[in-house]
Image (spheres, grey):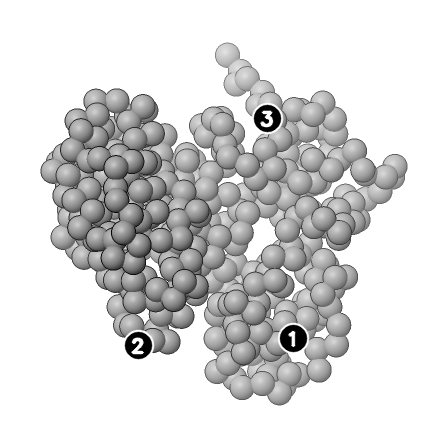
Amino acid sequence: MAEKELVLKLAGGGPTRNPKKEVVGRDAFVAQMIERLEYTSIEMFAPRRLGKSWVLKLLEVKAPSPVMAVYMDLEGAHSTYEFVDNVATAFKYAGKRLGAAVGKFLEGIEIGHLKNTGHKFPWKAHLDGVFQKLEAQNKPVWLLMDEFPLFLMNLTNNEEKKTATEILDYFRYVRQNYKNIRFVLTGSIGLHWVIEDLEGIGWRNPQNDDTKMTLEPLDLKEATRLAHALFKGIGKGMGSAKELAEVVEGHPFYIQKAIENWGQRKRGEGMADFCLRMACKPDDPFEFADLHKRLGNYFRRSASLAKSILDLLAQEGECSVKEIQSQLKGDREEILNILNGLEKDGYVRLHEGRYKLIQTLFRKWWQVKQGGSHV
């Protein structure tokens, strides 16, 4: 029997309703994650809106028995109390899916009864109590922590940098002393930005006891399959699926947003022109303006140089470090640090000694919206 043709509704970046059906083209990546989680924790890198949360949701439902995999979103956690409460609550909801595997464990922790004592909240005692009970289950436990770096940044913004370092140190302790517990840490900002900030106060404890994995855009076949399924869902444009997948270079969020705005495509308008016109709308549906907004937070005193580097790469297509230094008259080490940060976040790529912006559509948007003189 032929495989039933996939039909999907638009999500636009919202939460997946059915990960096994809706998360297209990530099975191989998740299989890799499962292999690595047998022996280590994972730090996942990717640019914003590439589908990190959806990948975690797919990993949660595809975790093999007897693994206890629990997804938790830490975006709203601004204190250690909220962090521990989110962890506990995540297990409460996971209990509905995991049944007996979690039920007995839940009896041993007081969901919703933690006492918030402000800065004196004993987060480590509470958290270690949870982790000790998890370890005692004598089965693999995967804690899939979405927006973990953002939670740490929330702490640093609240002048709790020391607490952030203590949490990172404690997680390292757990990875090295609790044989059943694994972490998958990811978020809309890279953990490297938080660590760099914390190193500024003298903290030194690199995350070198986990493995780093980079989430890439979909390949052309899977991106076309996703686009076709979404076009099928709105009943329009099925013949344009491959062309759209090529223009956005396999980025699933841009596929979603282009199809969401499909009714605004002009008669005879080329796909690349349509996508660029949509990207440049004042409401910024592709969210390209996000990087520009974040330059100050990421690079601080080097933000102006970072913008100039992006201006130059958008204009020239690709450049070596020597060419960038020659054009911008900047310090080589500072330029390299900026390029390294942009590369880790997935905005630029180094190939044969030359840097370039990864997304052609993003490069064109930058030329239109942010470009200007780079000297």
Q: Is mark 1 on a helix, strand or loop?
A: helix
State the residue at coordinates (64%, 51%). 287
Which-is-in-front pick, marks 1 and 2?
2
Q: Is mark 2 on a helix, strand or loop?
A: loop
Q: Where is residue 216 in the image (x, y as percent from the top left)?
A: 50, 49
Judge left or right: residue 261 versus residue 212: right
User: At label 2, which amino acid type do we have?
Assistant: Gly
According to the picture, the residue beneath numbered tag 1 turns out to be 308
Q: Position of residue 3 (x, y in %)?
A: 52, 18
Of callouts 1 and 2, the N-terminal one: 2
Question: Where is 312 relative to 359, above or below?
Answer: below
State the residue at coordinates (78%, 45%). 274
Which-is-in-front pick, marks 3 and 2?
2
State the residue at coordinates (31%, 54%). 118
How packed mark 1 is, by other alpha carbons closer than 10 Å (few <14, some 14-19, many 20 or more), is many
Q: Position of residue 289 (x, y in %)?
A: 65, 57
Inter-mark Cα distance, 3 to 2: 49 Å
